[in-house]
Image (spheres, helix red, strand yellow):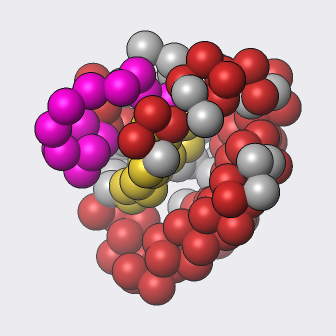
Amino acid sequence: MTRRQLLRSIDAVRVKDAIARAERQTSGEVVVSVAPIFWGSVEKAAQKAFVRLGVIQTKEHNGVLIFVVPGRKKFMVLGDSGIHAKVGQEFWEAIAVKLSEHFRKGDFTGGLVGAVDVIGEKLGIHFPYDAATDVNHLPDDVDFS
């Protein structure tokens, strides 16, 4: 599937709503980015996006990035150190399995929404939302740059 086809198949409004719903449970931030085709390491590109999109700037290091590269049929899920210390590698691997299952079926929106929902629940356990102090620091829109 090309990036253009993927872009048409993702319901960005549903993904944005899932991000907003997740962030109403937690002080953490969730970002979804769909990247254009590029040469080089997907992991390095995801790490750069993590910084570029501000995920690294969360106060409690509880930001999460779902980085999708449709032209390469690859994705990465990166959690900052604060959330990673709480959930461990097994959690990220389970998210990757969930995404892979949906993506293989061509259900990109369902995969992203499901992953964001689970991430939001887990963030909410370890970093609960506090209406008095929590501010949505990062946009909830899917990043397509």
Q: Assign the C terminus to one quadrant of the image.
A: top left
The image shows residue 127 at horizontal and vertical percentages of: 55, 61
* Above or below, 112 relative to 135: below
Q: Which residues are magenta?
A: 34-47
Residue at left offset 61%, top offset 64%: 100
Please tell me which residue lies in front, 66 or 20: 66
Whether residue 20 appears in this view of the structure is: no
Q: Quadrant of residue 14?
A: top right
Residue 92 shown left or right of residue 60 in the figure? right
Q: Quadrant of residue 54?
A: top left
Residue 81 shown left or right of residue 55 in the figure? left
Residue at left offset 75%, top offset 48%: 106
Please tell me which residue lies in front, 65 or 55: 65
The image shows residue 73 at horizontal and vertical percentages of: 48, 47
Q: Quadrant of residue 55?
A: top left
The image shows residue 17 at horizontal and vertical percentages of: 81, 32
The image shows residue 15 at horizontal and vertical percentages of: 75, 34
Residue 129 within the magenta-colored segment of the rendering: no
Please tell me which residue lies in front, 74 or 1: 1
* Above or below, 13 relative to 115: above
Whether residue 101 appears in this view of the structure is: yes
Q: Assign the N terminus to one quadrant of the image.
A: top right
Residue 52 shown left or right of residue 97 in the figure? left
Residue 39 within the magenta-colored segment of the rendering: yes
Please tell me which residue lies in front, 86 or 119: 119
State how many labels appear.
0
Residue at left offset 37%, top offset 70%: 84
Most distant residue in the front direction? 1
* Above or below, 121 relative to 51: below
